Amino acid sequence: MDIHDFYDKMDRDNILLSFKGDITAELLTSILQIIESKMDNMQEEPKLKKKVYIVLVELLQNLYHHMDDPSMASGSANDASRTAIFMIGKEQQHYNVITGNYIKNDKVTGLKKKMDDINALPPEKLKEHYKMILNNGQMSDKGGGGLGMIDIARRTGKPLFYQFTPINDAYSFFTLNIVIEQ
């Protein structure tokens, strides 16, 4: 691999930060601090900084809490392995936050349905749906109520762009691209 080509591609695509590796609580804190500092240096409006920060927190927490790692299935990796990819880029009028992680194939259909259901709701219905789930207090097996993606869609006013790439019989790679406009 030619690192200069990689650098040029990141520069052309306006990537502010990218990371591939093990996701830890300490890393999440560092990423948030780095992005906050970069946005301060770019003199972004406080309202936009807050929106980007809140979306980042939710996406990074989702990576940390909800990813599956195929290397764990074979027993070859440390059980603490939490490998994923994260990138944030800045275009003229918006930010792109992209995450990627492995997911078990038996979870793909359910997650796809949730994402499609969220994408189908107009803004006022998203707000109602968010409040309904919040008030019902239904929690997932990982401790979340499923509010994160709804909240992201509410805050950005944009669809959740996603893709599942089959890897093998057990796993797919889940890519999520969130657009945050100024």
Image (cartoon, rainbow, N blue to C red):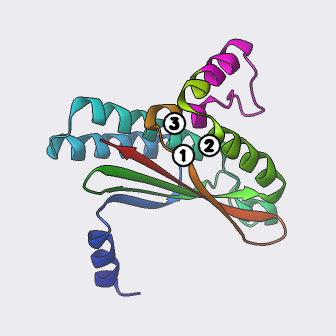
Locate residue 163, reporting x and y percent: 63, 61
Name the mark nearer the viewer: 1 or 3: 1
Q: Are marks 1 and 3 in contact (CB under 8 Å)?
A: no
> Against 140, is 101 above or below?
below
Q: Is residue 136 magenta?
A: yes
Judge depth for marks 3 and 2 and give the one in front. 2
Residue 160, x across and y down, in percent: 56, 47
Which residue of the protein is positioned furthest toward the bottom in this rendering?
A: 2
Dot 1: element? loop
Q: Is residue 124 magenta?
A: no
Residue that carries the numbered disc 3 in the rendered image: 152
Q: Which circle's residue, 1 or 3, is located before the other in the chain?
A: 3
Q: Which residues are magenta?
A: 128-151
Q: Disc 3 on helix, strand or loop?
A: helix
Task: State the residue at coordinates (35%, 87%).
Answer: 2
Q: Which mark is residue 119?
A: 2
**CA distance for labels 3 and 2:** 11 Å
